[in-house]
């Protein structure tokens, strides 16, 4: 035997509550039927593809690289061989610290004597065949004065007995071209002008012979002259 329990309070109010509950349940069922299948499940989950795209977008994109940009320059080392007139032949150690700059220093030998030379090479443009500007300085020891006079005069010339050997400095500037058929080899050539500064320690015998006066005294001889210069050479790089 069961006993029905009547809700306390106003019966009309209890009936209104029961009707509201039934309406809410019916509205919930209608909304569930109106949604497409799987919408509720997707609503509670994040899209992995969208998350990955957002993460990639959050990463900063690197700046584009210009394919025509020159690569970073690394210092190069090598040896330089050159032959020309009036410089003679020479061999030098070479360093190439910048794309547009080289420096060299070494020994040289010509018909007058042995010396040392050094200089700078400027390459203002990087082309298949590049322009080349060179500035050099050399010092020659114990040059044969007779051969020097012969070279200057263009015919055999004998100096006074007191002047047999002289030292001289040489400064030259040349303009030319260079070409690199391979990475480790560069060919070059150029023409220009050379300034000579010749010095002699004892010229009294020369002046006495010319003036026929044994009482003449003299200071050390210092002569200056210029001449054209031409040269060809090549560079062999080690790296």
Image (cartoon, rainbow, N blue to C red):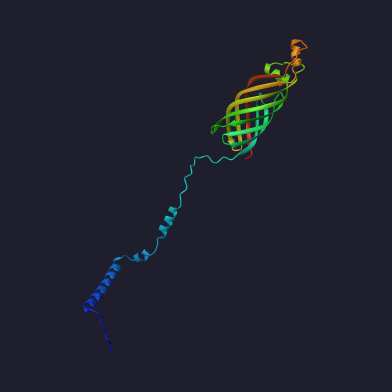
Report which quarter residue 22 is drawn in. bottom left
Q: Residue furthest left?
A: 12
Residue that protrudes farthest toward the front in the picture: 9
Q: Quadrant of residue 135?
A: top right
From the top left corner, tell me how far across and down residue 33 is, in percent.
Answer: 29, 68
Q: Quadrant of the N terminus?
A: bottom left
Depicted 170 relative to depicted 97: above or below: above
Residue 43 placement: quadrant = bottom left
Circle count:
0
Please, which residue is most extreme toward the bottom here?
1
In the picture provided, is 61 more to the left or to the right than 90? left
**Which residue is outermost to the right?**
214
Residue drawn at (63%, 28%) of the image: 136
Q: Image point 69% across, 19% down: which residue?
A: 222
Locate residue 159, reporting x and y percent: 74, 16
Rendering coords of residue 155 (x, y %): 70, 16
**Residue 174 to residue 63: above or below:** above
Quadrant showing the C terminus: top right
- Residue 192 spot, x, y in % from top left: 60, 24
- Which residue sits at x=44%, y=53%? 58
């Amino acid at each position: 035997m069961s006993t029905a329990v009547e809700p306390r309070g106003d019966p009309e109010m209890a009936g209104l509550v029961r009707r509201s509950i039934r309406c809410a349940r019916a509205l919930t069922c209608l909304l569930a039927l109106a949604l497409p299948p799987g919408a509720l499940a997707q609503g509670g989950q994040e899209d992995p593809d969208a998350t990955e795209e957002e993460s990639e977008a959050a990463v900063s994109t690197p700046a584009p690289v210009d394919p025509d940009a020159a690569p970073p320059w690394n210092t190069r080392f090598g040896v330089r061989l050159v032959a020309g007139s009036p410089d003679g032949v020479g061999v030098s150690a070479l360093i190439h610290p910048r794309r547009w700059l080289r420096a060299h220093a070494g020994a040289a030998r010509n018909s007058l004597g042995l010396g040392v030379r050094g200089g700078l090479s400027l390459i203002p443009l990087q082309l298949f065949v590049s322009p080349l500007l060179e500035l050099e300085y050399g010092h020659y020891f114990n040059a044969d004065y007779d051969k020097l006079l012969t070279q200057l005069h263009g015919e055999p010339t004998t100096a006074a007995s007191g002047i047999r050997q002289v030292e001289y400095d040489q400064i030259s500037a040349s303009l030319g071209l260079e070409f690199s058929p391979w990475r480790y080899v560069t060919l070059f050539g150029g023409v220009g002008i050379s300034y000579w500064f010749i010095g002699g320690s004892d010229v009294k015998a020369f002046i006495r012979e010319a003036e026929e006066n044994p009482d003449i005294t003299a200071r050390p001889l210092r002569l200056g002259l210029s001449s054209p210069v031409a040269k060809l050479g090549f560079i062999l790089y080690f790296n």
